[in-house]
């Protein structure tokens, strides 16, 4: 159940007033709109109410006037996130958090046709395991520009239709070998920007890889085309900025543009690319950032 976070009103209503007047244009109705606006404000819930690094925040917005309301925009740390309509007239924006986010107070601003709402939620620090890795110079240089460009373009995708439903499916039956968020020391130096951007399942080569939720195949990359770091790769667009990437595959059973369902076999586990043994790496991305897939598997999101 989402719980209302601490909420504080705008220090002044003038920004909402100005915005509304601007939205209404230079018409004679502006004054009456301004006065009726004062009673109309979004009701906002943030879930979970006590998040930790790696969690996805659902910002659920109920307009006072659902019929008249265009989709609001949510701003967190100077970055804007789109909200999409839920079936009941509310809107939802999904906000990614990662191990690289500074713990503490997150200010969440909701902007749209009703007066701006500012809310705050505390992001809890989480302890992630660490690994020590020794790399040779050759291993550091793995990866081609073609591969980086295609993966980066995939992570930018935000398509309007929500295709996931309920909790996500485990993509492989193997045990978790390396969880989300592991931090690393490379050759003894802590890697400030590194965290394990996914979950690794230990499984033998050929073991099936399933789509965690419905989606469209938006990326297929093969070692032969230059995917030397990721290996054979499948990217799935679940809609509304939620994406899965499966890497190091031995086999790919799908094509770009194909629709897949939750649990559908899309390929097989392998050890292609920069991999030390057969395993599946599943990365779950929300608006371009890798989030912890566990909450998506345990309770899911609307
Ligand atoms: Zn991995």
Image (cartoon, rainbow, N blue to C red):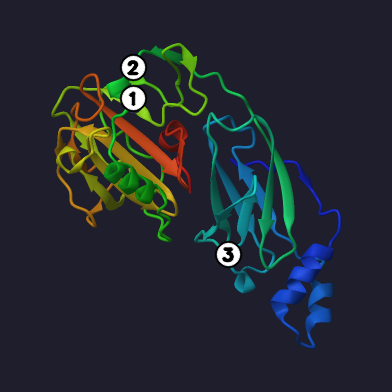
Relative depth, front residue between 263 and 79:
79
Image coordinates for residue 116, horizontal then vertical, percent = 73, 59
Image coordinates for residue 61, horizontal then vertical, percent = 63, 55
Discs 3, 1 touching: Cβ within 8 Å: no
Front disc: 3 or 2: 2
Quadrant for residue 259, please give it: bottom left
Discs 2, 1 touching: Cβ within 8 Å: yes
Q: Could one spot residue 70 in this view of the protein?
A: yes
Quadrant for residue 169, please give it: top left
Residue 135 is marked as 2
Where is mark 3, residue-wise? Answer: 71
Image coordinates for residue 257, horizontal then vertical, percent = 24, 57
- Secondary structure of residue under mark 3: loop
- Secondary structure of residue under mark 1: helix
Q: How far apart are marks 3 and 1 (CA)?
A: 44 Å
Furthest residue to the bottom? 28
**Residue 275 falls left or right of residue 113:** left
Image coordinates for residue 202, horizontal then vertical, percent = 26, 21
75 is higher (above) or lower (below) than 282: below
Asked whether mark 3 and ligand 1 are closer than 8 Å, the reply comes as no
Discs 3, 2 touching: Cβ within 8 Å: no
Ligand 1 quarter of the rendering: top left
Q: Residue at the location (75% across, 41% down)?
A: 6
Relative depth, front residue between 93 and 62:
93
Instruction: Please tell me which of labels 3 and 1 falls first in the chain.
Output: 3
181 is higher (above) or lower (below) than 26: above
Q: Distance between the residues labelled 2 and 1?
A: 7 Å
Q: Residue at the location (81% across, 74% down)?
A: 34
Residue 140 is marked as 1
Q: Could one spot residue 175 in this view of the protein?
A: no
């Amino acid at each position: 159940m989402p719980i209302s976070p601490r909420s504080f009103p705008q220090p002044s209503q003038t920004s909402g007033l100005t915005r509304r007047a601007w939205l209404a244009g230079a018409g004679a109705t502006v004054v009456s709109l301004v006065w009726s606006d004062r009673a109309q404000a979004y009701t906002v819930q943030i879930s979970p109410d006590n998040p930790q690094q790696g969690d996805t925040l659902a910002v659920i917005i109920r307009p006072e006037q659902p019929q008249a309301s265009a989709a609001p925009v949510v701003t967190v740390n100077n970055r804007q996130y789109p909200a999409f309509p839920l079936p009941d007239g509310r809107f939802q924006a999904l906000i990614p958090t990662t191990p690289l986010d500074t713990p503490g107070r997150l200010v969440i601003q909701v902007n749209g046709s009703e007066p701006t709402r500012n809310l705050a939620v505390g992001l809890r620090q989480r302890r992630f395991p660490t690994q020590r890795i020794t790399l040779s110079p050759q291993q550091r240089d793995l990866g081609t520009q073609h591969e980086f460009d295609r993966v980066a373009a995939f992570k930018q995708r935000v398509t309007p239709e929500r295709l996931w439903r309920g909790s996500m499916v485990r993509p492989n039956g193997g045990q978790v070998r390396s969880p989300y968020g592991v931090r690393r020391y490379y050759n003894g130096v802590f890697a400030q920007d590194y965290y394990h951007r996914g979950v690794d399942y230990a499984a033998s080569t050929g073991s099936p890889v399933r789509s965690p939720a419905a989606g469209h195949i938006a990326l297929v990359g093969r070692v032969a085309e230059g995917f030397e770091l990721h290996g054979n790769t499948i990217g799935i667009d679940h809609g509304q900025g939620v994406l899965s990437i499966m890497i190091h595959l031995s086999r790919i059973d799908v094509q770009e543009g194909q629709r897949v369902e939750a649990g559908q076999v899309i390929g097989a586990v392998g050890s292609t690319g920069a991999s030390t043994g057969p395993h599946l790496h599943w990365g779950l991305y929300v608006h371009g950032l890798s989030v912890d897939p566990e909450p998506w598997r345990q309770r899911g999101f609307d």
